[in-house]
Amino acid sequence: MRATYRSDPTSIGETLAFFNTIPKCAGILSQPDLRVIHPRNPDAFFHSTLRSNNGILKSIFIYQPAHPHTRASDVSSSETNANATPQEREQEGGRERGYLLLHLGAGVSGQPDIAHGGFLATVLDQVTGTLIRASGLDRGRGAVTVYLNVIYKKPVRVPGVVVARAEVGRVDGRKIYVMGEISVAEADRGGEGEGVCVVCEGMFLVKRDGFGRI
């Protein structure tokens, strides 16, 4: 992987090493122009609460810019691509993408051995929202979820590793339209978990200013 990182390299290095042992994750990490994104102000719910009681065991967010030839580096979320217009992004090579790789424990289950649907919706909200911050589309102000329409196709078995993927669809003023999906990194023995398990489409609204006005 071409991304570099600034802080706590041992922890991040170990996390990358773990996900690189899983072929599907390794395929994502081998793509060019990837950036490991460290949240500047991580939310307590996803980065603290859900990591307790055998919930999220390991995670890392990977950002892939729309332009395919930018030199990869580790940057804070508000520094990336902030000055490019949506039209420039399209010309530079398509849509921004974000990947959230997650090693999940049994603590996120609803029914036995199946991840809770509300948790999976949270993952999609997290990966799409983090992509918006990483891309700089929020102009450093932050953005809030207006709606997130989620469709559950297959159960996600836990414990296990999943890949959440997000793309920016279009931008209309302060409105940012996104798409996301969750797939398992390794199918179970019956092949039940193979393919995409959950999909969503949603819209975020960029805050009016840095003081949180919506």
Image (cartoon, helix red, strand yellow):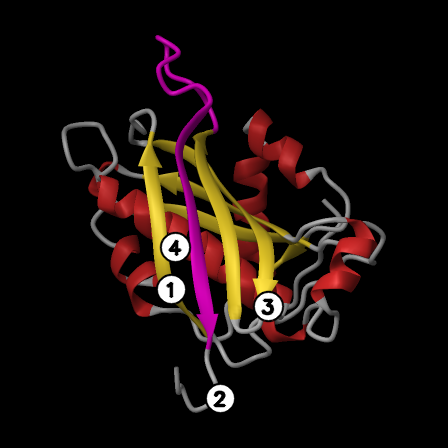
Q: Which mark is residue 134?
A: none
Label 4, label 1: how many angstroms apart (C-alpha)? 8 Å
Residue 67 horizontal/vertical position (percent): 79, 54
Tell whether label 1 touches label 4 (CB within 8 Å): yes
Q: Closest to the observer: 134 or 179?
A: 179
- Picture disc at residue 7: 3
Residue located at (79% from left, 49% from top): 93
Name which residue type carries label 1.
Thr
Residue located 60% across and 78% down the image: 139
Picture residue at 44% right of the left edge, 59% below the top:
203
Nearer to us of marks 3 and 4 is 4
**Local secondary structure at mark 4:** helix
Q: Earlier in the sequence, mark 1 or mark 3?
A: 3
Residue ID for mark 1:
145
Q: Real-space Cα distance between discs 1 and 3?
A: 29 Å
| Residue 212 percent location from the top left of the image | 40, 86
Q: CA distance from mark 2 to mark 3?
A: 26 Å
Q: Nearer the viewer, mark 1 or mark 2?
A: 1
Circle nearer the N terminus (1, 2): 1
Q: Which mark is residue 125?
A: 4
Horizontal side of 134 relative to 111 (left or right) equals right
Q: Nearer the viewer, residue 136 or 156?
A: 136
Residue 14 in view of the camera: yes
Direction bottom: furthest residue:
211
* Secondary-structure class at tag 3: loop
Which residue type does callout 3 highlight?
A: Ser
Residue placed under numbered mark 2 in the picture: 210
